[in-house]
């Protein structure tokens, strides 16, 4: 019996020490602090309604997690959001196709964008930061070019979408926005894919040691490329959701999402060096960042300053994860033993 009691206590301590527990506490603290600063924040319809404002960050970040675990980097997602929005609007308005069929074509467009950058990263060995930065400008330019060819003014965008398309993002289930339900379903799917399948194990192994993955019979290049494809599809889904929610398609959608997305992934516990991460951590971190931005805006902070706390979170998260990963080195720094030849005899 004492052994089982000790095991139960150890399991409980292990769960409390998990990074996800810290993120849950952070979310609860945000709710309390912002509720004190502005009591309206605690109203259920306001609190749940805030999810509509940052669902895009949540959706994209869970798929960018795959990329970072492989040891890559993805700063092109925001541009794919804008390109997807424009592709959706132009094809629907120009070809007159069913809006849901166009939505499927839009997701395929995002997959192609991810495949292109993934191919360059995996097969040409160009640093992923360089590839995704270049593709970010490329896809943003494509969106503006399409608008110009279609003779649509950028500031006006494309609107007058079918009511069935703009309505689904305004639905709610027991007061919970349907957008957030979509995010939860995608997070559950991503969790199973990453943590419960052979493909997920390949993702982790490619991030830990790509050469070892190759020796194990894994086609690491295709695995890495597939991670970028998933990220591109996630960005396209976010573009579709954002277009539906705002009722218009514009090329600049997503231009301010890069910093919150990367911060959510890193704050969620994913290593920027690859080989470590979790969907649950990313999902909780994305919610924490979204609530923080919403709570600060409700507290009177100008939107132009909202990236400051997000940047601070990113630096703190990287610092804490690096510190915890080098705990042994820290101990040696403060408690190091003298070399044998320096010890007193």
Image (tube, grey):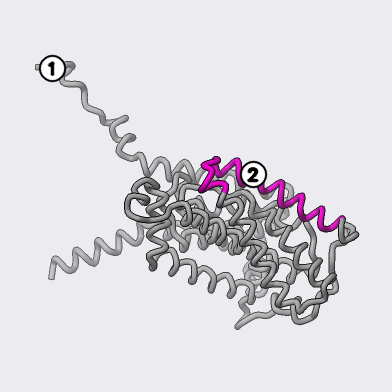
Disc 2 crowd rating (10 Å Cα; few below 14, some 14-19, many 20+) is some
**Horizontal relation, residue 282 to residue 322: left or right:** right
Where's residue 238, x and y in %? Answer: 65, 65
Does the magenta run of residues contain 124?
yes
Q: Secondary structure at mark 1?
A: loop
Write the residue at 51% across / 62% down. 284
Closest to the observer: 114 or 162?
A: 114
Write the residue at 33% across / 35% down. 330
- The image quarter containing residue 217 is bottom left
Where's residue 132, x and y in %? Answer: 61, 47
Which residue is disc 2 drawn over? 133
Picture layout, residue 39 above or below residue 206: below
Picture layout, residue 65 above or below residue 189: above
Prevailing secondary structure class for the magenta stretch in the rendered image:
helix
**Horizontal relation, residue 11 to residue 132: left or right:** left
Where's residue 221, x and y in %? Answer: 47, 52
Picture layout, residue 26 above or below residue 102: above
Q: Earlier in the sequence, mark 2 or mark 1?
A: 2
Does the magenta run of residues contain 123?
yes
- Residue 176 seen in render: yes
Q: In this figure, what is the number of numbered marks? A: 2
Which is closer to the viewer, label 2 or label 1? 2
Where's residue 159, x and y in %? Answer: 84, 69
**Quadrant location of the N terminus in the rendered image:** bottom left
Closest to the observer: 168 or 136?
A: 136
Residue 324 is tagged as: none
Which residue is disc 1 drawn over? 344
Q: Secondary structure at mark 2?
A: helix
Q: CA distance from mark 2 to mark 1?
A: 57 Å
Q: Which residues are magenta?
A: 120-148
């Amino acid at each position: 019996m004492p052994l089982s009691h000790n095991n139960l206590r150890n399991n409980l301590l292990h769960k409390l020490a998990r990074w996800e527990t810290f993120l849950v506490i952070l979310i609860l603290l945000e709710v309390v602090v912002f509720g004190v600063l502005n009591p309206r924040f605690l109203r259920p319809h306001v609190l749940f309604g805030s999810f509509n404002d940052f669902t895009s960050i949540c959706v994209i970040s869970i798929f960018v997690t795959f990329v970072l675990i492989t040891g890559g980097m993805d700063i092109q997602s925001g541009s794919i959001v804008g390109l997807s929005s424009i592709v959706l609007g132009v094809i629907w308005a120009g070809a007159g196709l069913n809006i849901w069929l166009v939505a499927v074509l839009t997701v395929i467009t995002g997959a192609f964008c991810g495949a292109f950058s993934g191919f360059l990263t995996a097969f040409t060995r160009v640093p992923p930061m360089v590839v995704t930065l270049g593709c970010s400008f490329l896809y943003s330019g494509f969106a503006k070019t399409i608008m110009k060819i279609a003779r649509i003014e950028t500031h006006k965008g494309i609107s007058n979408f079918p009511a069935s398309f703009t309505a689904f993002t305004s639905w709610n289930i027991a007061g919970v926005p349907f957008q957030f339900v979509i995010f939860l379903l995608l997070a559950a799917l991503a969790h199973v894919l990453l943590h419960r399948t052979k493909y997920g194990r390949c993702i982790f192994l490619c991030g830990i040691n790509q050469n070892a993955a190759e020796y194990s019979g894994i086609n690491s290049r295709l695995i890495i490329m597939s991670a970028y494809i998933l990220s591109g599809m996630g960005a396209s889904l976010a573009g579709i959701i954002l277009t539906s929610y705002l009722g218009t398609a514009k090329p600049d959608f997503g231009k301010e999402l890069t910093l919150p997305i990367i911060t959510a992934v890193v704050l969620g516990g994913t290593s920027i060096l690859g080989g470590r991460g979790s969907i649950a951590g990313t999902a909780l971190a994305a919610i924490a960042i979204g609530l923080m931005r919403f709570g600060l805006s409700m507290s009177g902070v100008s939107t132009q300053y909202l990236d400051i706390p997000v940047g601070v979170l990113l630096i703190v998260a990287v610092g804490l994860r690096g510190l915890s990963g080098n705990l042994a080195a820290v101990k040696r720094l403060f408690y190091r033993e003298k070399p044998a030849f320096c010890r007193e005899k």
